[in-house]
Each structure stands twice: as C-alpha cells, then as structure tokens.
Amino acid sequence: MANKPRSGTLSLMMILFVCLVSASLGQAQEKPLKKISWGVTSLSASNWIPWLAKEAKIYEKHGLDVELILVKGSGQTSTAILGGSLFAAPVAVPTVMLANLGGADLVNIAHTVPGVQSKLLVKQEIKRPEDIKGKRIATSSLGSLGDFLFKYIIRKNGMDPIRDVVWLSIGTPPERLQALVSGRVDAADLSYPTDAQAQRMGYRVLWDARKEVVYPSMSVVTRRKTIQEDRDTVMRMLRSHVEGIAYFKTHKDFSIKVLSKYLRTTDQELLEGSYAIFKEDFISTPYPIMKGLEATYDYVAQTRPEIRSRKPEEFMDPSFIAELDKSGFIKQLYEGSR
C-alpha cells in the first residue's frame, strides 16, 4: 500500500513530461519561417541558384521563406535593396561602387560567377586580334557592358577601340547574329545559346570575355545596415545560396528540370548546354572577388575617377564565406559526390 502513492506520482510526472515535450516539439514545428525577398535580375540561366534553392526547399531548410522578385538591371536592384523592398540580390560591382560613392551602404558578400558570359564571334578571315582593325562590330548598345568589355579587350591587345573599329548598336543576340550572317557586320557580341549557333554556322570565337576579363557577376549584395541588425538571417540566406550551388553541381537532372520550368522551354540542347557552362562557372566557395578588378575600376572611372583611391575591401565583406569555408560546411556539401 505504501508504494501506491509513489507509483501514482511517477505516472503523473511521466504524463507531465510527455506533455511538455510534445508542446515543445509543437512550438518548434510551428515556428514561422523568416520572410525575405530576393531579386532575380533576368530570366536567364545565370539566376539558376535562387530558383533551385527555392524548388529544392533549401531556403526552408535554413528557416527562410524567400520570395523571388523579378527586377531589371543593377540600377533598379540597388535602389530596391536600399529602399527595403529587397533583402538581397545580385548587383554588379560597378553599381555597388557608384552607389557607395554617393553615400549608400551596399556590400558584396559573395560572387557566384567570375566572368561575363559573352563571346565575340567573327568571320573566318579574322584569325588574330589585330585582324579586327577596320572591322564593324555589333554590340547591344553603346555604353552597355558588352560594349565596354570588348573595348577593354581591344585596348588590352594594343589597339584603340574607338579609332581602330566601327561599333554598331544592334538589339538582341539573334539580331546581331543575323547582322553577321547578312554581312552588315564582321563581328558580333553574342551570348549562349546564340554563340553556339553561330559556331555551328562556321563563325569563330575571337574572344571569350569570361576568359579575357575578371568581371565578377551574380553576386550576393545586401546593406551593411542589414548585416549589423540581422546578421543571422544574412548568414542563413548565404548558407542556402552556397548549398544551392552544391545541389546544382550534384543534381543535374533536377537542376535542368528547374531551369526548364523557369525559362519555360523544353529545348534539351539549350538546357544541357547551359548546365555544362554553369557547372564550370558557378564558384563552389564563392568568396567576393577582390583581385584583378582593373576592368571594373576602368568602367567606374569613366564617370567617377575618384574610385581609383578606393580599395575593393571597402565594397566587400568576405567574412560570411570565410566562416562557412573554415567551419567545413562547404566541404561537407560535396562529400560523397563524384
């Protein structure tokens, strides 16, 4: 009889313990995801990683509910970040520099791609860099990134890009290819898949911008104020981004399915070709690129020469990737993959 009260007490304690654990688990499961917005700068394969991270529920894994918002160009994107309507997004380094020279606090915390996906396709008779002298080159628009990059490359090869060649502004890559075919121009600035189509037609690559110029793109840019106030969310966002890159490289079929959905295409050649390019180009450990930025400085110096006195470190924060790298997080993502 003496043991009955003790037995009843133990039973009651066990029931209370189970209830507390259940309640705790329930609260953990009901914890809302942190909502943030990410800017998608174009409907192209370069924006593959945020689409993939969302479809593979990688953002959710790291406690985030990410809304992907389509924006046009780095100018609009930087304005949206500074205005608070975007938590983070890709913004070109020159735009970050120009904004910060004007008093903004944008900061680049990762670079996903080291160069620009653009090639100069030329007629067969143009075999050496100096053969471009006196020729007509089609670019999207005067002052565009492609226009700037190939002028930079021409200058690097000892020629004057203004005096030695003729530049024509011609809209889209397919329109520029048509100008090349018709003989209206001798060379054209083309991107994938139009560049591959031109090569199949017999035109040759004189310069591949991503191999000629360090011009990092598909960055992760946010505000320094955001980092100071909510570093944890910034880290979770970047952890998701880095894991998205690893998932892309180790899950080809799923990745292609995602690109097919967002580009609304079933062109297998386009999808396979895009995967081959970006599997090589997406940086597994995407530290902000701070070396070899001569072309970037030249671009900004055209309107703001004072940029020459500013260091790349003023516009970058490598601490997030450094933490993920040194902790072994990134290495673990690739363990067991071929």
Image (cartoon, rainbow, N blue to C red):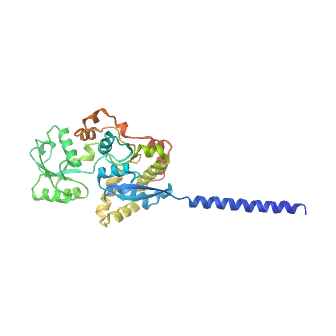
- The picture quadrant where one finds residue 26 is bottom right
Query: In x, y percent, where is residue 334?
Result: 46, 51
- Looking at the rendered structure, the number of numbered marks drawn on it comes to 0
- The picture quadrant where one finds residue 172 is bottom left
The answer to whether residue 80 is visible is: yes
Query: In x, y percent, where is residue 89?
Result: 37, 51
Residue lying at 33% horizontally and 52% vertically, measured from the top left? 77
Q: Is residue 231 left or right of residue 101?
A: right
- The picture quadrant where one finds residue 303 is top left
Query: In x, y percent, where is residue 217?
Result: 32, 48
The answer to whether residue 334 is visible is: no
Query: In x, y percent, where is residue 333?
Result: 47, 51
Name the outermost residue toward the top: 309
Quadrant of image for the N terminus: bottom right
Closer to the camera, 240 or 29? 29
Q: Is residue 2 left or right of residue 294?
A: right
Residue 295 lies, with reference to residue 83, above or below; the image says above
Residue 305 lies, with reference to residue 134, above or below; the image says above
Closer to the camera, 285 or 161? 161
Closer to the camera, 338 or 238? 238
Residue lying at 56% horizontally and 58% vertically, measured from the top left? 31
